[in-house]
Amino acid sequence: MQHIAIPQDQGFSFGHSINDLFRLMMDLERQPEGAVTLDFSQCRFLNPIFLLGARLIAQHYQRLGRPIILNTQCHNRFFHEYLQLTHFTEGFQPATLSAEACNEVLQGYYPKTYLPLTVFPLGLSDEATSIRENLQAAIASHIKTRLSLSGQVYESVSYLITEMVNNINDHSRQQHGYLFTQFYSSKGYIDIGFADIGIGFLGSYQLTGHSTISTHEAAIRAGRLGQSTKDDPQRGFGFRTSRSLLVDGLGGKYFLFSGDAFLYNDKETPETIRTLKINPLIAWPGALVAMRIPMIASQDFNIYTYLE
């Protein structure tokens, strides 16, 4: 059996966790055929963005018939407990609970600096829609109360969560979406990751007749410009609105990864869209969005400046 050791400690660098995810994907592609163990046994601290990515990449390989084993028997008992409490292996699934029970579970995380890795149902049914809406409201409310967020920052967090969950529901063509969040109160920000292992930006455009969009990079650029995959020309603005609100408005960090292309933007870094050149086999099977959201906005911040 092949073995990949997961980094012990990523620190707080937003980019470090993303680079580690790239390396993990590259390491998996380099392994010969057969089962692979992702070994977390030496880990002490990992960013939720990396953990979400690692968990879903393992699931993607398993879905393709490649056995991936997650060794979460960590020597560090605090990190071992963290993986258990965040439901890292199986994911917290509110679809198996009533709305009241789901809210009760999330309320149990009030003393914690994180919420569980959550699996939410996709689809147009009343049941799936109700579960998503309740989940979005519960998470946003929990973050507001736990971190004592101001009105405008809370509205922004709530908008970003709702917009990303809705985008996954609209475009992934899957049964489930995923999110994972961690609070860093002493550092003044929140990290949230949203992901699916569906058809990605390119697949979404191609399945709706946009045959001239033929690469993942072109698909991300089309999304950045607000080109909708739907018949309604008013749809398709959520991606660029969320990025603008987070980066231009709040001064946060934004990363999007779909196929072999990614977009990165923060206040100091101009918006960059690139195709990965490390290895042509490395590609995210769907879409992964990572956000670092500041907990305090500037005095002149107005959320409605950024909403289209």
Image (cartoon, rainbow, N blue to C red):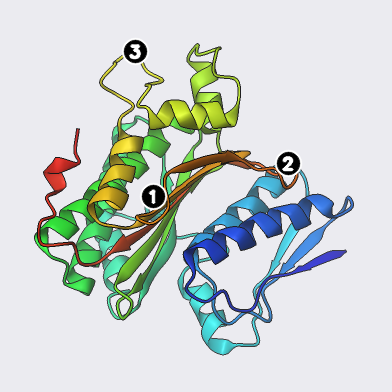
Tag 3: amino acid: Asp
Q: In the displayed structure, would residue 289 be above or below residue 149? A: above
* Quarter of the figure with the C terminus: top left
Residue 90 seen in the figure: no
Q: Which mark is residue 106?
A: none
Residue beneath disc 3: 231
Residue beneath disc 1: 95
Residue beneath disc 2: 64
Tag 1: amino acid: Ala
Tag 2: amino acid: Leu
Q: Which x, y percent locates residue 78? A: 52, 86
When asked about the image quadrant of residue 268, the answer is bottom left
What is the crowding at mark 2: few (fewer than 14 residues within 10 Å), some, or many (at least 20)?
few
Front position among marks 3 and 2 = 3
What is the crowding at mark 1: few (fewer than 14 residues within 10 Å), some, or many (at least 20)?
some
Viewed as shown, does residue 306 lie left or right of 260? Answer: left
| Count of numbered circles on the image | 3
Q: Residue at x 42, y 65 (%)?
A: 116
Q: In the displayed structure, would residue 168 be above or below residue 298? A: above
Q: Are marks 1 and 3 in contact (CB under 8 Å)?
A: no
* Secondary structure under the numbered disc 3 in the rendered image: loop
Q: Residue at x 77, y 65 (%)?
A: 37
Q: Residue at x 44, y 30 (%)?
A: 171
